[in-house]
Image (cartoon, rainbow, N blue to C red):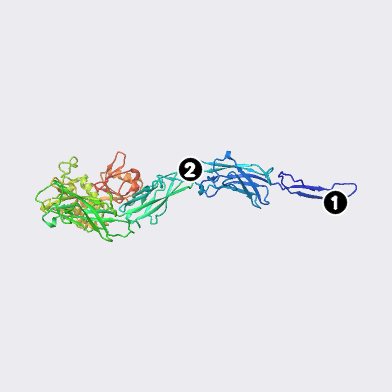
C-alpha cells in the first residue's frame, strides 16, 4: 500500500483489510489486518492574543498553535499596515524575525515537542514613552505554507489577529523638574515647627488617573512626611530636631495603573537666630526698683550638626522727639552708642551673653519712649520667622523668639488704665479692667490667665476689690500691692507683691495699656504674682495641682467642675456646653495636646468660651490676647480635651 503525498492536513487515517469468503478456500474468522496512514501535513493558526501595556513587565502576545508536536517548525508572518497603528521597534520591542530594514516580515519557530508558540509584544519600561497616544494596535497575519517556497505547513483559521498596545503614561511633575529645578530646592530656618509646609509637590497623569505620592528615599530620620493624595511635604517634628541640615528626598508620584515618576527635592535647614528679651525699662532713682532691658540672641539649628561660633548682626532704630527713645535714655551694654552692632554666640552655645540696658533717670515726663532692634540676615543664618519658636523662659516677657523687637522705656506703672479701645465698652465705674488687658507671657499658665480673662469679662468689681495699694501706684512712690486671695471658700490670705516689671526668675506676664504719662497697667501682673505666691512660687504654676478650678477658687471663692471629654461625641460635648451656658456657668475650654491644626485652635492650651456664633460654632478668646479662635461643631471631639464649668458669683 503506497500512500499518496498530498498537501491537505487531514490528520492520521486508518485502513483495514479483511478477507472475504470464496468457494476455493476457507479462512479463519479473524483473518483481517489494519494499517495507519500517517499524515505528514502540518496546520498552523493564530489561536489567541493578549494585549500589551506600556511599562508592564509581562508582555502581550500572539499565540500560535499547530496540530503536531513533532520537530522544529519555522512559521512566517507579516504585519498588516492597515490594522496597525503602533510602531514596531518603537512602541514595542522588535517582533521576532523583524528589525531595521525589515520592519514588517518576521518568523517564529516552534521547538520540537511543543504545539504552542507565543510571539511576544513587549511594551515594557524601555518603551514607556511620555507621548499621549491612547491604545494602539498591531495586527499580523500568517504567510508561507501551501504554495509558498519551501512550504512545510498549511495556514489554518484564524490566520490573522490583532493585539492592543495600551497606554500607561507616567505622571508628570508640574513644574517640570528639568526646566524648573529651583522649585524643588527648598531652604528654611531651623526654627520651623512641627507641621511646617516644606513644599507642595504636584503631578498630573496624562490619562487622568488619581496620583499617590510617597517619599521613597532620603528620609532616614523621618523628619518629613508627604500627603499621599495632596503631595504636600511637611515636618513631622521641629526642624531643629533633624539629624542633619541637608536632605535629598526622592519623591514618587504613582498612578492607579502603577506607572510611576520620581524626582528629587533638595532641602536645606539653615541656622535661624531669634531674640528673646525683657522689653521694658523703667526709670527709678532707687536701683532696687529700677527695671532693666535684657536682650539675648538664641540660635536654632539641626541637632545633629556641630555648633560653631556664630556672629549675629543687628540694627538699632533710635527715635527723636516725644515718644522715641534715644541714646540719652539708656546706658550700658554698648548698644546705646550704635546704630548697628554684633554679638557672638560661642562654640557649642545656644544663646549669647545678655545685653543689659539701664534706663537713665530723666527730670521730665514724656510718653512711653521706644526703640527697635532688628536682626540682620547673613550667609551663616536667617532671622527666625515672625511666628518663631515658643520660649518658655520666665526671665523674659517675649513669648516667642522674634526677628525684631520694640523696646519701651517707661516712667513707671499704675494699677489700671482705661485704654482708648476700651472706653466704649466699659462702664463709668470700671477703672480700666478689660479682657484685652490680659496678655499671657512665656510661663505656661494659660489656665490661670483664662480665669483672669473671665473675671475681667463677667465680674470686674471682684478684681478691683482684690488690691490694696501701699505707697502709691508708681515706681517713684514704691509701688507695692497687697492682694487678698481665697485659700478655701471661707478663708483668705493677703499676699504683698511689687509692681516692678523686672522679670527676675519669675515674671512672664505682659503689661496691659499705658496712660498718657507712660505709666504701664499692671493689674494682671499683680494677680499673677499673688497667685504664684499662693502656690509657692512661679515654678509651681505649671506643675501638678494647677487647674482652672483652683484659680477660680483663689480669685472668687467659688467652686467649679472639670469634665473630661475623652470618648465623647461632638453632640455630647455640645449638649454639655449648651446646658452649662444656659445655667449661667462660666466656661473655660481645655484643648487636647493632639488637636489637629485644621481645628484652628492651639494645642494644649486654654480658651475662654464667649458664646455661640450665628452658625453655632464656638467663639473662643485666647488669653494670649491674640489668635482668638472659632471652633466648628464638627471638630469638638477632635479638639476639646476637658471643659471647666465655673459657678458664677
- Residue 447 seen in render: no
Q: Which of the labelled discs sits on residue 28, or is there none?
A: 1
Along the line of sight, the residue nearer the viewer: 94 or 132? 94
The quadrant in which residue 493 appears is bottom left
Q: Is residue 101 left or right of residue 263?
A: right
Q: How many marks?
A: 2
Nearest to N terminus: mark 2 or mark 1:
1
Q: Nearer the viewer, mark 2 or mark 1?
A: 2
- Residue 353 seen in render: yes
Q: Is residue 387 left or right of residue 423?
A: right
Q: Residue at x 89, y 49 (%)?
A: 25
Residue 237 locus on image (x, y percent): 34, 54
Along the line of sight, the residue nearer the viewer: 35 or 527? 35
Residue 380 locus on image (x, y percent): 29, 55
Quick check: 155 above or below 396?
above
Please rate how many residues cluster around mark 2, counting C-alpha atoms within 10 Å: few if below 14, some from 14 to 19, many from 20. Answer: few
Residue 397 locus on image (x, y percent): 22, 53
According to the image, label 2 marks what residue? Answer: 131
Q: Is residue 275 left or right of residue 176?
A: left
Amino acid at each position: 500500500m503506497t500512500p499518496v503525498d498530498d498537501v491537505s492536513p487531514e490528520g492520521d487515517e486508518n485502513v483495514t483489510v479483511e478477507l472475504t469468503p470464496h468457494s476455493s478456500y476457507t479462512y479463519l474468522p479473524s483473518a483481517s489486518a489494519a494499517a495507519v496512514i500517517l499524515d505528514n501535513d502540518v496546520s498552523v493558526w493564530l489561536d489567541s492574543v493578549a494585549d500589551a501595556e506600556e511599562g508592564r513587565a509581562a508582555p502581550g502576545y500572539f499565540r500560535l498553535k499547530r496540530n503536531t508536536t513533532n520537530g522544529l517548525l519555522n512559521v512566517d508572518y507579516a504585519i498588516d499596515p492597515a490594522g496597525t497603528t503602533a510602531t514596531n521597534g518603537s512602541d514595542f520591542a522588535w517582533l521576532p524575525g523583524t528589525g531595521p530594514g525589515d520592519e514588517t516580515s518576521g518568523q517564529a519557530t516552534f521547538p520540537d515537542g511543543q504545539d504552542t508558540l507565543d510571539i511576544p509584544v513587549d511594551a515594557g519600561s524601555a518603551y514607556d514613552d511620555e507621548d499621549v497616544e491612547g491604545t494602539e494596535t498591531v495586527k499580523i497575519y500568517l504567510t508561507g505554507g501551501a504554495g509558498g517556497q519551501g512550504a512545510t505547513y498549511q495556514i489554518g483559521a484564524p490566520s490573522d489577529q490583532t493585539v492592543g498596545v495600551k497606554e500607561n503614561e507616567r505622571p508628570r511633575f508640574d513644574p517640570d523638574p528639568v526646566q524648573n529645578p529651583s522649585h524643588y530646592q527648598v531652604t528654611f530656618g531651623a526654627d520651623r515647627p512641627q507641621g511646617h509646609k516644606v513644599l507642595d509637590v504636584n503631578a498630573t497623569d496624562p490619562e487622568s488617573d488619581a496620583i499617590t505620592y510617597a517619599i521613597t528615599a532620603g528620609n532616614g530620620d523621618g523628619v518629613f512626611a508627604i500627603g499621599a493624595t495632596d503631595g504636600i511635604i511637611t515636618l513631622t517634628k521641629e526642624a531643629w530636631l533633624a539629624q542633619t541640615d541637608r536632605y535629598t528626598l526622592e519623591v514618587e508620584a504613582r498612578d492607579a495603573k502603577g506607572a510611576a515618576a520620581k524626582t528629587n527635592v533638595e532641602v536645606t535647614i539653615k541656622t535661624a537666630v531669634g531674640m528673646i528679651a525683657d522689653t521694658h525699662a523703667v526709670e527709678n532713682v532707687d536701683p532696687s526698683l529700677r527695671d532693666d532691658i535684657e536682650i539675648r540672641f538664641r540660635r536654632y539649628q539641626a541637632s545633629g550638626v556641630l555648633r560653631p561660633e556664630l556672629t549675629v548682626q543687628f540694627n538699632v532704630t533710635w527715635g527723636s522727639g516725644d515718644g522715641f527713645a534715644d541714646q540719652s535714655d539708656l546706658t550700658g551694654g554698648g548698644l546705646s552708642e550704635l546704630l548697628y552692632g554684633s554679638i557672638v554666640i560661642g562654640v557649642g552655645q545656644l544663646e549669647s551673653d545678655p545685653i543689659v540696658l539701664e534706663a537713665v533717670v530723666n527730670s521730665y515726663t514724656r510718653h512711653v519712649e521706644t526703640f527697635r532692634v532688628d536682626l540682620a540676615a547673613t550667609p551663616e543664618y536667617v532671622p527666625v520667622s515672625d511666628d518663631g519658636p515658643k520660649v518658655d523662659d520666665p526671665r523674659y516677657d517675649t513669648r516667642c523668639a522674634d526677628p525684631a523687637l520694640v523696646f519701651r522705656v517707661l516712667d513707671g506703672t499704675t494699677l489700671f488704665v482705661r485704654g482708648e479701645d476700651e472706653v466704649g465698652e466699659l462702664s463709668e465705674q470700671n477703672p480700666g479692667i478689660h479682657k484685652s488687658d490680659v496678655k499671657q507671657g512665656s510661663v505656661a499658665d494659660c489656665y490661670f490667665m483664662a480665669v483672669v480673662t473671665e473675671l475681667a469679662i463677667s465680674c470686674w468689681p471682684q478684681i478691683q476689690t482684690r488690691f490694696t495699694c501701699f505707697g502709691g501706684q508708681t515706681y517713684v512712690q514704691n509701688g507695692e500691692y497687697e492682694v487678698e486671695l481665697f485659700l478655701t471658700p471661707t478663708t483668705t490670705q493677703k499676699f504683698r507683691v511689687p509692681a516692678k516689671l523686672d522679670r527676675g526668675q519669675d515674671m512672664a506676664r505682659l503689661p496691659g495699656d499705658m496712660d498718657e504719662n507712660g505709666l504701664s497697667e499692671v493689674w494682671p501682673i499683680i494677680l499673677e504674682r499673688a497667685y504664684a505666691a499662693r502656690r509657692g512660687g512661679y515654678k509651681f504654676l505649671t506643675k501638678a495641682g494647677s487647674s482652672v478650678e483652683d484659680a477660680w477658687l483663689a480669685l472668687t471663692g467659688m467652686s467649679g467642675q472639670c469634665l473630661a471629654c475623652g470618648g465623647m461625641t461632638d453632640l455630647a460635648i455640645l449638649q454639655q456646653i449648651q446646658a452649662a451656658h444656659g445655667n449661667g456657668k462660666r466656661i473655660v475650654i481645655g484643648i487636647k495636646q493632639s488637636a489637629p491644626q485644621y481645628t484652628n485652635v492651639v494645642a494644649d492650651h486654654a480658651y475662654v468660651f464667649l458664646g455661640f456664633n450665628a452658625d453655632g460654632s464656638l467663639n473662643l478668646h485666647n488669653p494670649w490676647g491674640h489668635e482668638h479662635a472659632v471652633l466648628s461643631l464638627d471638630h469638638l471631639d477632635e479638639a476639646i480635651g476637658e471643659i471647666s464649668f465655673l459657678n458664677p458669683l
